Amino acid sequence: MKQLQASIQTFVQTLPQSRKRVHLLLGILLLTALLPRVYLLAKVSEKDFLHNDGGEYMEISRQLSQGNGFSLSFYRWYEFPRPGQKDMLHKDLSRPPLFPLLGSLVFFLPVNPLFWAKGISLLLSLTAIYCVFLLGKEFAGAVCGLFSAALFSIYPYALYYTISWSTENLFLILLALSFTFLLKACRGNPSSFPYCGLFLALASLTRPTALPLAFAFIVIWVFFSYKSGSWRVMGKQAALFLGIFLLLLLPWTIRNYRVGGKFTPMTYYGSYAFWLSSSDVIYETYRTMDTPDYEKKTGELWNRLHAERLAELKEKGAYDIAEASRWWKQWGLDYIRQNPDKMAYIWKERFFHYWRMCPNLASLSTTQIVLLRTFFTCLFILALAGLFLLRKRKETLILLFPPLFGLVISIPFLFVLRYRYPFFAPYVCVFAAFVLTWLTRKAVGEELPEPFSTGEKGLIPSRK
């Protein structure tokens, strides 16, 4: 028994220095994560796989493969054709381009496109696990990276979005890579900073909510580097960051100007989402959530309010989303101005919604609720313990920023738990993994410095 304990102790202590062992454990982890994902993808129906906006993305990809550009052959619930229009094919202004471009590949391959779409979804899911490993490794070493990847591999929403044709995992991958290179840059490797611009631009072309992060990245990098770095070097790397970021956004910005009339990399969906987030639909959603009345009351309001708004748009002659966007925005502002009490309630509920462990309880079984609450309770406790242990480390602010940013942008705008996942899951898993790393190294008898100062023996290795 003592010999076994000694072997385990030696293995753990030498693991960070052995790339082969780290890669072996990571390979075993990815293989283990592969099995349930393949099973779930085999079981999921086409309807469930393409639910929410998955059908829209697949249709845009199909039109791209046929040479019709970013287009749709049908109108969404908040759009309608012009009078007398026979051809339903029209340019899309609601969805960003990167995920449809990726999805268009499935239409150039043999066999059913749905088969390849599921394959891409599986690959994205496994890549997301690997990127969380890289993030944890950069933050606190290989052991933390392995624990981070392990926790993320069983994260409920990581499994759920494997069997959903959506932007979530692609956005998460690009965002995690952006913050991984930001950590590198802030630890004395300024040449890593332009890579942040590359991945952040691609993330913005997957979901526009990443756009404001460009300014935040520059502020964070300057905050961490101004004492030790040369202003000339910092200026050069910041210029490269901005140049790469803007250059990648430029083609899509020009396309939006030519099609929608605005020189912007954003989509035109934001105004509609703003109205929906500031309406009685959301007010009733929060008021009836977790009750049997939820679907009936919100469904009735949804149908009635959309019918009224679409009728008004027809009267105004706003026949496409570019023309209608200013009206959706105005209706949202009017609701906020006329219903301050309801908006205060919505904002309060949205704050607490961001920290919810489960979606609408009325749609889940008792077993699902117990499993979700158990997992998230344990994860949140570990993450909070990690934040406590890391309270004196400036690097903690970098990985704490994405969850807080996600919270801030969710309060004034439309929010569902799927929007939280890319900003929240990887970083909470890293904080929780830090505690598991600390406990593991304590268990094998390593002496850890207090309060975890940077150095070769510290949990956060020096990058100097």
Image (tube, helix red, strand yellow):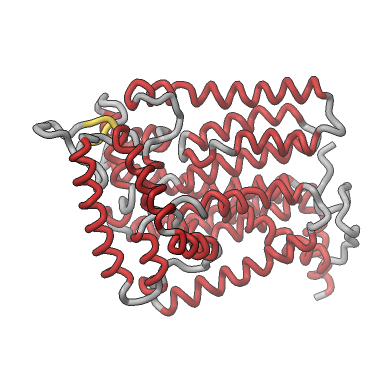
Seen from this angle, which residue lies furthest front?
Answer: 338
- Residue 126 lies, with reference to residue 363, above or below; the image says above
* Residue 35 in view: no
| Front residue (pair 341, 117) | 341
| Front residue (pair 428, 259) | 259
Q: In which quarter of the image is the N terminus?
A: bottom right
Q: Image point 84% across, 73% down: which residue? A: 2
Q: In which quarter of the image is residue 295?
A: bottom left
| Front residue (pair 5, 187) | 187
- Residue 349 lies, with reference to residue 138, above or below; the image says below
On the image, the x and y values in percent for residue 456 come to 88, 47
- Residue 254 lies, with reference to residue 438, above or below; the image says above
Q: In which quarter of the image is residue 374?
A: bottom right
Q: In which quarter of the image is the C terminus?
A: top right
Q: Image point 72% across, 41% down: which residue? A: 183
Q: Image point 54% across, 36% down: which residue? A: 211
Seen from this angle, which residue lies furthest bottom?
Answer: 366
On the image, the x and y values in percent for residue 212 come to 57, 38
On the image, the x and y values in percent for residue 97 come to 40, 33
* Residue 417 in view: yes
